[in-house]
Image (cartoon, helix red, strand yellow):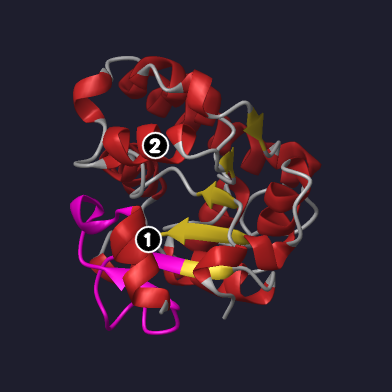
Amino acid sequence: MATFKQIKGFVFDLDGVITDTSLYHTKAWRQLAEKLGVTWNKDLEEGLKGISRMDSLELILKTGGKENDYSHDEKVALATEKNTNYVNEIKQMTPANILPGIKDFLDDLRDKGYLISLASASKNAPTVLKQLQLTDYFPKVVDPASLSKGKPDPEIYTKGAELLNLAPEQCIGVEDAEAGIQAINAANETSVGIGSAKTLSAADVRFDDTSQMTLANIEKAMA
């Protein structure tokens, strides 16, 4: 793990870190799963965290034993249907949906000269940032369409650092999902996990919730 003094930039996931869109994702995916006759359960819900739209659909279909029941075009149509429902939900979001402490943390990062990028698998991330009025904090956003592999592959976090013109060792990645922590670690960045110790045991630094994530607390944990 790098030292705190080496850190020049932060690469953020979106869902579960800046805001909680998982409720909207879960609602939209569950609607689709039930339409397809796939039984919804907690394991499936957890498994969908942090992975791409098409990978999420494939997991749902595999859970129901239906992975070979649809053509590629039909799968794209199903994923598009889910996304339409999701977008309608997130358009109701406001700055009140920013998770506790995150706005202050972003202000502190900007005030102290840290560079910031977003590494979300969601193609709707720019829309969410706009609704939260946080667009100005994230001038650099990894385009999910440019990725060849999803988390836990490190590609998205590697690109997040590249957008900042920083080496991976100069970056901290922030995640709430196990696959995301694996991606950060594989990218040779310092991983900060938000969530349970059981799920995020591989994180270099971990906080129970976003309100605990401050520069002072990160520096203390990295000492």
Q: Quadrant of residue 118?
A: top right
**Residue 63 pos. (x, y %):** 44, 68
- Which residue shows up at 41% across the image and 64% down it? 177
- Which residue shows up at 71% across the image and 36% down it? 143
Amino acid at pointer 2: Leu
**Residue 207 pos. (x, y %):** 26, 67
Q: Quadrant of residue 219?
A: bottom left
Q: CA distance from mark 1 to mark 2?
A: 17 Å
Where is 98 relative to 169, above or below? above
- Which residue shows up at 44% across the image and 72% down it? 178
Where is 205 relative to 107, above or below? below
Mark closer to the observer (1, 2)? 2
User: To which residue does mark 1 refer?
Assistant: 176
Quadrant of the drawing holding the N terminus: bottom right
Residue span colored magenta: 192-214
Q: Nearer the viewer, residue 2 or 209?
A: 2
Contact between marks 1 and 2 (CB within 8 A): the answer is no
Of mark 1 and mark 2, the one earlier in the sequence is 2
User: To which residue does mark 2 refer?
Assistant: 106
**Residue 105 magenta:** no
Q: Main secondary structure of the magenta part?
A: loop
* Residue 5 visible, this orientation: yes
Quadrant of the drawing holding the C terminus: bottom left
Amino acid at pointer 1: Asp
Q: Residues within 10 Å of mark 1 (few under 14, many from 20)?
A: many
**Residue 189 pos. (x, y %):** 62, 68
**Residue 201 magenta:** yes
* Residue 65 visible, this orientation: no
